[in-house]
Amino acid sequence: MYRWLIISCLISSSLWAQIESALVPQPAQVNWGTKKFVIPKTVVIEALSIEDQNIGQFLVDYLKERKVNVTFAPKTRETRPITLVRMLPDTLLPEAYYEISVNEKGAAIRATQSVGLFYGVQTLIQLLPPHGEQLDLPYVEIKDYPRFQYRGMHLDVSRHFFSVRQIKKYIDLLAHHKMNRFHWHLTDDQGWRIAIKKYPKLQEVASHRNETLIGHYNSKPQKYDGKSYGGFYTQDEIKEVVKYAAARFVTIVPEIEMPGHALAALSAYPQLGCTGGPYQAATKWGVFDDVFCAGKEETFEFLQSVLDEVMALFPGQYIHVGGDECPKERWKKCPNCQARIKKEGLKDEHQLQSYFIQRIEKYVNSKGKRIIGWDEILEGGLAPNATVMSWRGEAGGIAAAKQQHEVIMTPENWCYLDHYQAEPKNEPLAIGGMTTVEEVYSYEPLPTQLSSEEQKFIMGAQVNLWTEYISSDAQLEYMAYPRAWAFAEVVWTQKEKRNFAGFKKRMSLHLKTMDHWKVNYAKHILTNN
Ligand code: ACM
Ligand code: ZN
């Protein structure tokens, strides 16, 4: 009886500690203690190298916001410091592995590599109470590492443009939740958003549209706002964002769409279309028949030169080349495209698309980089080294994994954050569909149709945020969060540790930390979800 009582006390106090510290995503192993380490008003962070201090700076910045004085020291006699420790590299441990111990000696984060140290720092921030004057850390032992290596989040900046400031905030929130890929959708029919030195008309012409459709694209009659809309990132801005992301262990995957979704580019360089134009950047949403001409050599010269500049700007391994939603109407009637089909011995326009992507892949590979494409790149034959991003359900991803190609899962039903997140009649206008935070949370990236050998080709998963109906920073955050944080747990947390009821409970506290960061998250999860 007595024993039982003690055990029950321990359980309830450890549950209590858990609710006081909302860790998102849930770590692989957490053992809560019962005591607390009260952080003094002046605290020393022990970090040996400048690199470790740079990582520790994220904690310093946060503690300073919470009115704690922090100093760095390579070694301290302080009795209860926060220490950042680099253990010896252990090849058996995952790259992002870290451990945290909080006990009577203070708090220690141990990692084998910088990225693990960074994630340990993010977790330590989450261990602190989100509000109140007294900052204490619960005694705890954590061992943590990710389930998937590709933990991605996408943003469309073509349909609506977002400032460098907002992109940085997006990356901050991604990294804080231990996601590591930012898929930056930089070009589409409605606007080209990256300056390319060789083709100045991309920024002068293709970055603007004449006006924008008001309301849903299915609504009738269609009304337009009559206002010119545009924006682009200079190459210096891109470099600044790449550096910012790298400091947070986020790799940017830039997307340059081809052969479809090309109207904005064609408005600046009409000779790259089958008909020669004139063209205008799209003023409404959808899929358009005018695409890059696959018959003209000039198209490939243009795209290769664009990719040269893109590859120089983005140090990551992957370049996303789109490949989705490319109608074949123009190609069917274009003498250049038909001549290409004949010359290359292709069967039809689907094989012409495959020729297009394979040719671009060969070029990208020759520069030491790799391509990713949406799952349409399977049609007409997959480019030999391409990674497939499966969005029209999981079938494309399953087929690609069976062909031993790398796959990133992002099926619409779970991973499209432009869908409504609750009953549409109570929500601001969105594209359609409904994907609640619980549905996002329930996503399982490894399809049971694949053998365990085939499942190894699933590198991870991603959520996408298309912005046809998102024109402000506030709306962007409302659609992204907390669904993206539910997804962070899908890609980071070990499957058996996932539990929506627990997530929901942790969110009620975690959202208070997000209040410090002034995030306009949606609040459904606090009430009826
Ligand atoms: C897509 O949603 N068109 C990839
Ligand atoms: Zn053509």
Image (cartoon, helix red, strand yellow):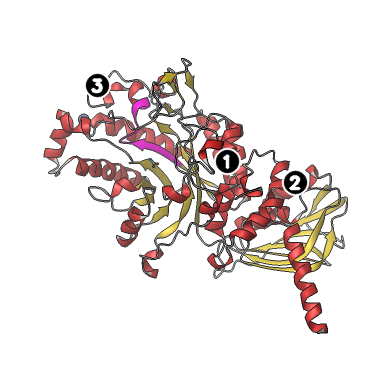
Taking the magenta stretch, the answer to whether it contains residue 256 is yes
**Could you say whether the residue bearing mark 1 is in a helix, strand or loop?**
helix
Secondary structure state at the residue bearing disc 3: loop
- Residue 237 picture location, percent across and down: 55, 31
**Location of residue 293 with respect to 133 vertically, above or below:** above
Residue type at mark 3: give it: Gly
**Quarter of the image where the N terminus is located:** bottom right
Reading the image, the residue beneath label 1 is: 243
Asked whether 405 falls inside the magenta stretch, the response is no
Query: Which of the pair 252/351 is nearer the observer?
Result: 351
For numbered disc 2, what is the local secondary structure? helix
Tell which of 78 and 356 is nearer to you. Answer: 356
Amino acid at circle 2: Tyr
Quarter of the image for residue 276 reads top left
Q: Which of marks 2 and 3 is nearer the N terminus?
A: 2
- Residue 29 picture location, percent across and down: 64, 68
The part of the chain drawn in magenta is 254-265
From mark 2 to mark 3, how far is it between C-alphas?
55 Å
- Does residue 249 appear in this view? no
Location of residue 334 with respect to 96 vertically, above or below: above
- Quadrant location of ligand 2? top left
Which residue bears the numbered disc 3?
Answer: 276
Nearer the N terminus, badge 1 or badge 2? 2
- The CA span between labels 3 and 1 is 39 Å
Sequence-wise, which precedes: disc 3 or disc 1?
Answer: 1
Q: Quadrant of residue 501?
A: bottom right
Residue that numbered label 2 is attached to: 62
Q: Is residue 45 left or right of residue 86?
A: right
